[in-house]
Image (cartoon, rainbow, N blue to C red):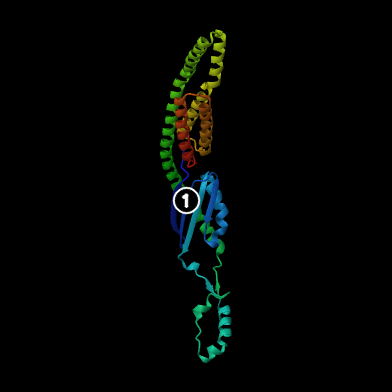
């Protein structure tokens, strides 16, 4: 099945006093690459999230943004009263405080080291976040894959239109190919007859046939057009295939093989019309290669 490599999905939920949000974006990339942004306290989930992404996606630059907002009282930090009292005792001893020049602001003391203690249930919070983020990841990936499949249908239509254009040119080249040798034979006979008349000599018919046969061998493009048609047939099969395996690299490889056969056709055939069709085919192949870069 053809899927685009660009897509977007997001999901959110509320669980155990926390609001969790996760979004997944994917862009073109020849390989699989991830960029996962998690809240600092949940960085330990990065490897697990990446593994889940690899199970669902094969290629592309995948960016994950995850956020969490605690709305329950369990998120509150505890005040270390003894540490706060120690800070107050030391600050109160300052002359400026004693004289009343400065006033003591307790709120300003809270960021001092040791005053605020994080919740002691960190393991439970991590477990809740793991369940929430993995659930959201499944939902977001499902939305992203759906978007990839929709864009993939558009890619199929465009790729198939280029394939049909190339196939039409291949048929034209096949129809023109036999006439190339016949035209050469006609020109060669006329030229030889003219030279013989001027020189007053004769040439053996077998020599003429040998020369024509050698030319036909040099300019024969039957094998190249046959292989090119076979590549086009295989390309069409991949476009219709419903297999879940990614085929973007295979399509790109097929396009390279088609280009190789087309270049050989252009170099072997002296006919200007065939050369023009070969140039048109190469232009369509280039468009296929461009679009194949966005196929998973």
Question: In which quadrant of the rendered view does residue 89 lie?
Answer: bottom right
Residue at the location (42% across, 30% down)?
165
* Rendered location of residue 3, percent (x, y): 46, 41
Residue at the location (43% across, 33% down)?
162
Q: Residues within 10 Å of mark 1 (few under 14, many from 20)?
A: many
- Residue 1 visible, this angle: no
Vertically, is 173 above or below 41? above
Vertically, is 57 above or below 282? below
* Rendered location of residue 45, percent (x, y): 55, 56
- The tally of labels here is 1
Residue at the location (50% across, 67% down)?
75
Residue 255 or 195: which is nearer the viewer? Answer: 195
Vertically, is 198 above or below 111? above
* Rendered location of residue 250, percent (x, y): 53, 36
- Residue 265 visible, this angle: yes
Residue 293 or 117: which is nearer the viewer? Answer: 293
Furthest residue toward bottom: 99
Mark 1 highlights which residue? 25
* Rendered location of residue 54, percent (x, y): 54, 46
Circle 1 sits in a helix, a strand or a loop, which is it?
strand
């Amino acid at each position: 099945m053809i899927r685009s490599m660009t897509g977007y999905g997001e999901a959110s939920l509320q669980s155990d006093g926390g609001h969790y949000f996760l979004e997944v974006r994917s862009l073109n990339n020849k390989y699989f690459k991830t960029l996962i942004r998690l809240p600092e306290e949940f960085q330990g989930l990065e490897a697990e999230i990446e593994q889940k992404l690899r199970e669902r996606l094969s290629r592309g630059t995948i960016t994950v943004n995850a956020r969490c907002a605690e709305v329950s009282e369990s998120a509150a930090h505890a005040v270390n009263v003894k540490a706060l009292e120690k800070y107050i005792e030391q600050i109160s001893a300052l002359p400026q405080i004693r004289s009343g020049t400065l006033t003591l602001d307790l709120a300003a003391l809270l960021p001092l080291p040791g005053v605020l203690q994080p919740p002691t249930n960190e393991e439970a919070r991590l477990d809740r976040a793991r369940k929430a983020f993995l659930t959201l990841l499944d939902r977001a990936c499902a939305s992203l894959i759906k978007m990839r499949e929709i864009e993939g249908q558009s890619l199929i239509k465009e790729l198939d239109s280029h394939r049909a254009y190339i196939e039409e040119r291949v048929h034209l080249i096949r129809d023109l190919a036999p006439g190339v040798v016949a035209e050469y034979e006609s020109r060669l006979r006329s030229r030889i007859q003219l030279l013989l008349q001027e020189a007053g000599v004769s040439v053996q018919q077998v020599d003429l046939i040998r020369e024509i046969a050698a030319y036909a061998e040099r300019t024969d493009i039957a094998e190249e057009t046959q292989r090119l048609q076979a590549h086009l047939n295989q390309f069409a099969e991949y476009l219709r295939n419903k297999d879940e395996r990614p085929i973007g690299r295979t399509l790109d490889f097929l396009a390279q093989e088609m280009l190789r056969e087309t270049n050989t056709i252009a170099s072997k055939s002296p006919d200007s019309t065939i050369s023009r069709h070969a140039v048109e085919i190469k232009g369509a192949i280039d468009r296929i290669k461009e679009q194949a870069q966005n196929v998973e």
